[in-house]
Amino acid sequence: MKSTPILLFVLGVLTMALALTSPCAIARADGAPPSTALPPDAPPPGLSPSKVTVADVIAKWKTAHGTEKAKAATEIEVDSIDAYGLTGSDRTVSVGDDYLDTYTLGPVTTESGRYHGQRWRLNENGIVVLEVGVHKKNQVDAQALRDAMIAPTSGVTVAGEVTSPVPAYVLKVNPPDGRLEWLYFDEKTGLVDRADAAYPDERVTTTYDDYHPVNGLMEAWHTHVSDGWVANDTDIRVLSDDVDVPVSSDQIKIPDGRAPIASFPANVKSVVLPARIDDGAVIVRVMIKGRGLDFILDSGAGGILLDSEVAKELGISTFGKSVQQTMGAYESTQAIIPNMDVGPISLTNTYVDCVPFTQQRGYDTKIVGLLGFDFIANAAVTIDFDKGQVTATPPGDFVPPTSSIAVPIALDDGVPYVQAQVGAAIGDHFILDTGSTDVLVFSAFAGAHPKDVSDEGLGRSISSYLPFISASGVGGEITMIPTQVSSYHFGSVAFTDFLLMRTTGGSAFEAEDSDGLVGYDVLRYFKISFDYQDGYVYLEPGSFLQGQKATTQPTPHPK
C-alpha cells in the first residue's frame, strides 16, 4: 500500500509593503477548520501514560501484520478516489522497487513513479519532472521506524495510550530532520488505525480500516485523509490488489510526457514576449478569449494561476474545490483553458489553478495571474533586466550563452531550487523567484545559522523607523525583518554588506524544506535564462553589477 502524497504548490508573488498598505487583494477561504482542530505539533488528546515499550507495540504489530508469503515480483493495485468534490481512480503498477502510479481525479490525470532508482512525476499539463529528493522528512521517519523494529532508537518512543476513538497505543516518531508523527496501534488488533503528521500550518490525520490479507500481509483497504478543512477530505478505497501478475517494462518506465501545451510560430528560434519590468516585477500580457490580462512571470509559482473572479467573468468552467494555504487560507478551484496566447506563443488546453488573487500596480495595471512552471518549462525564457526585455525559445532550440554562469536547479516542486550562501552558511534549497522583489531567508535557515544571519546594523536602523514591514502574497501577509549580512553569495557572485529580509515564523508560505527566496534584489544584476529541460539557470552579469560590492567569475558549463 502506498501513502497519499501531500502536494505542494508554491505561489511566489511577493512585495514588500509598509503597514496599512495593501498591494495585493486576497480573498480568504470561507469558514475555518473546526474549533477542535489541534495545532500541528500538539500531542494526541486524551493521552495517558503507558507501561508498554516500543518493542512490545512493534512485536504485536508484526504478528498482526503477518508474514509475506514470498517476495512479490509484481503488483497491481487499483483504488477509487473521492476528493475535492470529484471522483477518480488510482492505479499503481509495481515491479520490485520500481513503480508507476496513474492518478485520475475529475478530468485530470497525473503520474508519478520510480524507475531504476530515479523518482519522477508527470504533472497536470503533461510535463515530466525528474526529482532529486528535496523533501526527505517522510523517508527519514520511515527509516526510523525500520530501525526501531531492530533495536531501540531515540527517534521512536512511546507517547502513551488513548481510549478514543478506540483503545490504542501511541508511538511518537520524531527523528532528527524528520517529521513529527503519532502512530495509533489498536490495542485489540495490533494494527495501525491512525496517523497524525505535523506539516507547516496544518495537522494531517490519516485513518485506516477494512483490513484485507494481500500475499500474507494485512493491508488497509480504506484510507481517509483530513487536514481539518472538510473541503480537503480525501477518501480512498482499494478495489483490487493483485500480486505476481504479468507486467511489461513499458508499464513502469518513465514516460516522455504528453504533447507540449505551447506552440511557437513556424521556423522561429526566438520570440520577444509582450512584457515589461515594473519595480522588479516581470509583467506579461496574456490573451484569453480576446481579453488582454496582466500576469507576472513567476518562477516561484509551481504552475499557472488565474484569478477566480476573472475566470468567472470570462465564462471559464472550473472544477474541484479545496482550501490551500501559503500566507493564509484561501479557496482554490481548477480549470482547463482551451486557448491562451502569450504574444506569438499559443497555449492549448492548459490546466490552471484558480484562486482569489489580484494585485494593483499603479493606475493602469491589475495583475490577475501568474505564469509559472508550466509556461517556463514549455518555453526556455530569458529575462534581460538591463533592456527590460523578455524572450522565449523552444526548449530544444535553446543554446546556453557562452559567457554565463551555469547554476544547476532542482525542480521537484515545479520551482527552481538553487544553492546560495549567507555568511559561511550554505543552503541548497533557496527558491529562485522572479515573483519576489526581495531576497528572503526563511526562519528555519535563520534559526540554524544565527551568526551568519546576524544584522550588521543597517537592518536595525531601518526597523527603528519602519517597524512594520510585511510581505504580501497569495493568502495574506507575513512579517519580515530587514537584516544586513556580512556577505551573500549566489551564482559565483559574492555581495558584501548585503541587505536581505528574514521571515519570523514558520508557515506554509515558507515551503517545507526550503531555505529562502532569491528575488529581484539579486536577479536584477543579471540577464537570466531558464532552461528547465536541461536543469540549469544561466546568469550573464549585467551593467547593474558594475560598481557593486561584489566579485564575479563565470563557471564552466556542464558537458
Image (cartoon, rainbow, N blue to C red):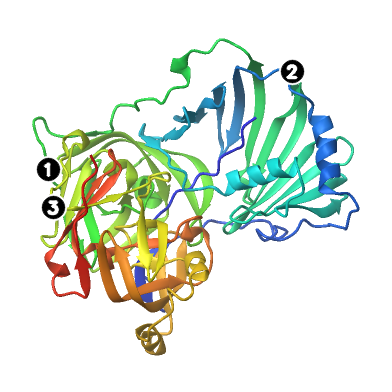
Viewer-proximal residue, 189 or 265?
189
Is disc 3 placed on a helix, strand or loop? Answer: loop
Viewer-proximal residue, 194 or 290?
194
Picture coordinates of residue 124, whole percent (x, y): 41, 35
Distance, label 1 to label 3, CA atoms, is 21 Å
Give whichever of discs 1 and 3 has the lower sequence position: 1
Image quarter for residue 110? top left
Amino acid identity at mark 1: Val
Amino acid identity at mark 2: Lys
Q: Quadrant of the C terminus?
A: top left
Q: Using the image, tell me which numbered label, if any, was put on residue 403.
A: 3
Viewer-proximal residue, 25 or 303?
303
- Measuring 17% from the left and 68% from the top, which residue is drawn there? 545
Q: In this view, does 407 lie to the left or right of 143?
A: left
Image quarter for residue 18? bottom left
Assess disc 3: are there few (<14), some (14-19) or many (≥20) residues with their C-alpha within 10 Å of its C-alpha. some
Is disc 2 placed on a helix, strand or loop? Answer: loop
Q: Can the viewer see residue 21 in this picture?
A: no
Residue under pointer 2: 69
Q: Using the image, tell me which numbered label, if any, was put on residue 271.
A: 1
Amino acid identity at mark 3: Ser
